[in-house]
Amino acid sequence: MEGSSRRPTINDVARMASVSKKTVSRVINESPFVKEDTRKAVQAIIRETGYAPDPQARGLAFRRSFLIGLIYDNPNPQHTVSHQQGLLDAMAGSGFELVVRPVDRTSPRLLDEMRAFIERQKLFGVVLPSPVSEDERLATLLQDLDVRYVRIGSVALDEPGRMLVSHDGKGAAEAARHLADLGHRRIALISGPTTFRSSVERRKGFESGLAERGLTLDSDLAKVGAYTYESGVAAAHELFSLPSRPTAVFCLNDEMATGVYTAARERGLRIPDDVSVVGFDDSSIASRLWPPMSSVRLPLRDMGRIAGEMLVPNAMRDKPKVQPDIQPELIVRASSAKVG
Amino acid sequence: MEGSSRRPTINDVARMASVSKKTVSRVINESPFVKEDTRKAVQAIIRETGYAPDPQARGLAFRRSFLIGLIYDNPNPQHTVSHQQGLLDAMAGSGFELVVRPVDRTSPRLLDEMRAFIERQKLFGVVLPSPVSEDERLATLLQDLDVRYVRIGSVALDEPGRMLVSHDGKGAAEAARHLADLGHRRIALISGPTTFRSSVERRKGFESGLAERGLTLDSDLAKVGAYTYESGVAAAHELFSLPSRPTAVFCLNDEMATGVYTAARERGLRIPDDVSVVGFDDSSIASRLWPPMSSVRLPLRDMGRIAGEMLVPNAMRDKPKVQPDIQPELIVRASSAKVG
DNA sequence: AGCGAAACTGATACCGGTGTCATGACGAGT
DNA sequence: ACTCGTCATGACACCGGTATCAGTTTCGCT
């Protein structure tokens, strides 16, 4: 009743259980070298007092924190949000916390800043979504610092335990086959900057999908955008003013695909009657546009969750071992139809 | 050259500077009780060795971490992202880190979980965006735990130093005046759940805006939605099937406003010719819809930044003291026009 | 009963900082 | 020169855990 509202420490528990603090420590850390009776007695006190170890003190002694870092430089906030949600799904109740850290991947001080951040916080693990995951120097740094990490990207750049591959190419190939199967022959592509691995992989997949149907990508029909709405509008106008207009346009992200909608409207072209459009990302806007837009969906949240499970110890304790496939999925809506 | 790659500690610095570790500590913490010469000598060693104090050890001694918590339960990820970005803007280079923590505000264990989280991590400060900020129990808990916090919400619920008010009502009033000034008389409202403070405040503001123009909200024209796309579609259909259709619809968020677009299309009503639409949030979708949608914008990122500056010591060190007003702004686009 | 190995436990140092308090140095006042 | 009060500094304990290693039980076996 005295209400000393101080949180109990390991010393309090040790005293109450009449054991040394080291033994309490052993119980907390699930050491096998504790007699069953002792363990139960200590656990009883822990429950009774509501004791929980201090992560700072623990981290200090362990020389490692219980923080997972999410390091991102994402032009698309939607991706970051989804990854973050998935990560948090996996981390919930694990005792680990997520610290988020946006970076400028073009900064000359990037590596120094990252080293300082990771060393100071003594991060337990790090998640690197694309495009940060594509920086080989960062991966090397993390290896040097002996920090666990998971890179999320469109293509395998690291060993499986450290890399989560989203197979963007497969999704793009599916889109290509979809359009070809609808009878389209002049299918245009608006890709992203070639510095983005995702753009390169998606384009590769798209071309191989076309090839499966005996088609090739006409160089007139291949435009390079900037992954932005405006660049989508501009590229679409170029395509629509060609002597022989494409009957379908595949965009390597939804932002640009939305730009195609605008360009089409400005020219009086109807979607999908005059031109089919397929995007990539299945962002929330895709299903709200008119007509609702077909788009390739990546399981971003699942990827975040799996990355978390790869990093957090025991995250998979009672869960099935099956690592669900990370597979893109083409969501077909009204923007893609049989060629007129 | 020996390459003992261990990070330098305060002891290393103390030895090299021939002072006690306590003096180094004083220099780090900018204590005024250090002779100028000593300070410079120590700072030189710090620069030379690249020493940086360990936040865990420091936190352990301080009984407080250098972590700021962002606790959210946001139906709208866009809000969370923006707030988070702003917070990180303010925190960049401050030595503080952001840990994010989604919660279910309806969970019966919410308070226990929050208490455990905050106590264990010994958070330095906490940011509570709406609607979590509206929970008075959480604010009380934070006061009990003696943790600094900033609540972000549409109406003042706390003292100024702990509350950031977004004045949603003003934005809604502006929308009402805008529509009235365009000649609309039958202006409908689709509001959010009455459990959301934001919805209540926005509605209040809307009605007061109407009143300024001598109008009142007809009860037939006031629909309650769920802040979702689907509820917007449903409410719009109800409105459009009224004997005397409204000529304008104001929605308390963009999701529902997007639903109005869909309902209008399904009935062959043209925007803005047959019906004007104004949303709230100015989400990315607003400018991508056709026609581009008028919407009330809240400076979410700025709000996050200001919240960060309120929590992080010295964040305002060299910055002007002027706390920019948090004012909503009506972005007028093509979806609102003179009444036919 | 005797004995060695294995199982269990605790004393003590340590992780890398800060708080407390005593002590030394220095300038002002008399 | 002597006494103070202020400034500057360091010795030591402490924050709340873990590692090391030695000491004590317990147990199986002869």
Image (tube, coloured by chain):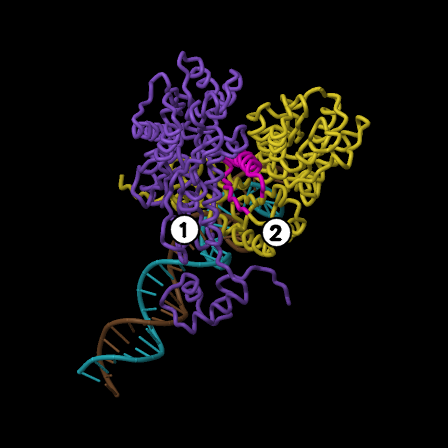
Chain colours: A yellow, B purple, C cyan, D brown
- Report the side of B335 relative to B140 (left or right): right
In this view, A29 is above or below B312: above
In-front residue for pair B79/B69? B79
- Tell me the quarter of the image containing the N terminus of chain A: top left
State which mark lies toward you, 2 or 1. 2
Q: Which amino acid does label 2 sit on?
A: Thr
Residue segment shown in magenta: A74-102
Residue that label 2 marks: A106
Is B152 left or right of A37, judged from the image as shown?
Answer: left
Q: Is residue A98 a member of the stretch shown in magenta? A: yes
Residue under label 1, please give it. Answer: B312
Q: Indicate the quadrant where residue A13 lies.
A: top left
SS assignment at label 2: loop
- Horizontally, is D3 left or right of A26 in the view? left
Pick whichever, A115 or A65, lies toward us: A115
Question: What separation in Å lies between label 2 and label 1 (alpha carbons)?
Answer: 27 Å
Asked whether A307 or A82 is in front, the reply is A82
* Residue A322 shows in this picture: no
